[in-house]
Image: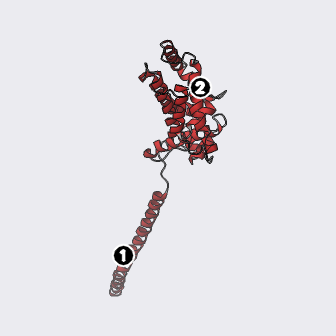
Amino acid sequence: MARISRNHAAADNAVTNAEAPARIAGKERGASKRQLKATQTDTRSANTASSAPTASAGRRPGRPTGAARGPEQRARLLEAALTLFARQGIVDTSLGEIAREAGYTPAMMHYYFKTRDQLLDVLIDECFAPLRASLGLPFQENSDDPVAAITQLTERLVQIASDNPWFASLWVREVISDGGLLRQRMHERFGFAHQKASLLAIARWQEEGRLNASLEPALVFVTLLGMTILPLATSKLWRNDPLRGKIGGAEIARHAVALLAQGIGPAKRD
């Protein structure tokens, strides 16, 4: 019996020893499958995370992407605003229309300018104030020569209008017309000191005999604008006119200066 038991035990041990490699291999295969599955899961998670859009901290709707594009977008919106203001007036132009004119969304417009009043203040500070200052230089640089001052002012007006296609129409609509919003805002910001200084210079020139005493100082600039800005603002109407179609800024400036300096009488001969 003891021998039989020992024989059975030996047989069992042999079987156990024979099965051990198979069980170990099975465990290793199971571990490998679990490891592969975990690796695949991690890979899918990584791919999902990499494909998900990253939200920038502090990103707001309409905020421009890329710092380098910001100034360009802002300048494009300002140019679109000037174009529409000249075409249909400030009051009748909405921020949404300006955005569409520039090719942007309303959200982009509101990122830069929350209201139309804010936009108008920016235009006054960055566009109209420098132009206004440049128009005052001829009187400062030619304080003893009224003809030179008025000639330079005329040429500068025409040059500004030629360089900025919106200028003439906008000036007619919003500055020299009754109820012009731009004129009101300009006067609120800068007052009448600049205009008064120019009128005093004209009156002084008349007293000194340097300028025709029959001129009305307050009408000199209105006359000048009428002879320069109005023809430029309406030039599109007679672009195909055989007689006036070739008239440009240089001809308009020369004509205005001749009228102001010499009138309609015959030119003096030496």
**Residue 118 locus on image (x, y percent):** 56, 32
Residue at 62%, 33% (x, y): give it: 172
Cα separation between marks 2 and 1: 104 Å
Residue of label 2: 222
Q: Amino acid at mark 2?
A: Val
**Where 27 falls versus 52 (above or below)?**
below
Q: How is the image coloured?
A: secondary structure
Q: Secondary structure at mark 1?
A: helix
Residue of label 1: 24
**Where 183 falls versus 41 (above or below)?**
above
Sequence-wise, the earlier of marks 2 and 1 is 1
Q: In the image, is 87 to the left or to the right of 112?
A: right
Q: Quadrant of the C terminus?
A: top left
Q: Are marks 2 and 1 in contact (CB under 8 Å)?
A: no
**Where 62 falls versus 14 (above or below)?**
above
User: Residue 10, which numbered label?
Assistant: none
Tell me if residue 169 can be seen.
no
Q: Quadrant of the N terminus?
A: bottom left
Q: Residues within 10 Å of mark 1 (few under 14, many from 20)?
A: few
Tell me if residue 266 can be seen.
yes
Picture quarter containing residue 219?
Answer: top right
Q: Secondary structure at mark 2?
A: helix
Which of these two is toward me, 3 or 244? 244
**Residue 30 locus on image (x, y percent):** 42, 73
Q: Amino acid at mark 1?
A: Ile
Q: Nearer the viewer, mark 2 or mark 1?
A: 2
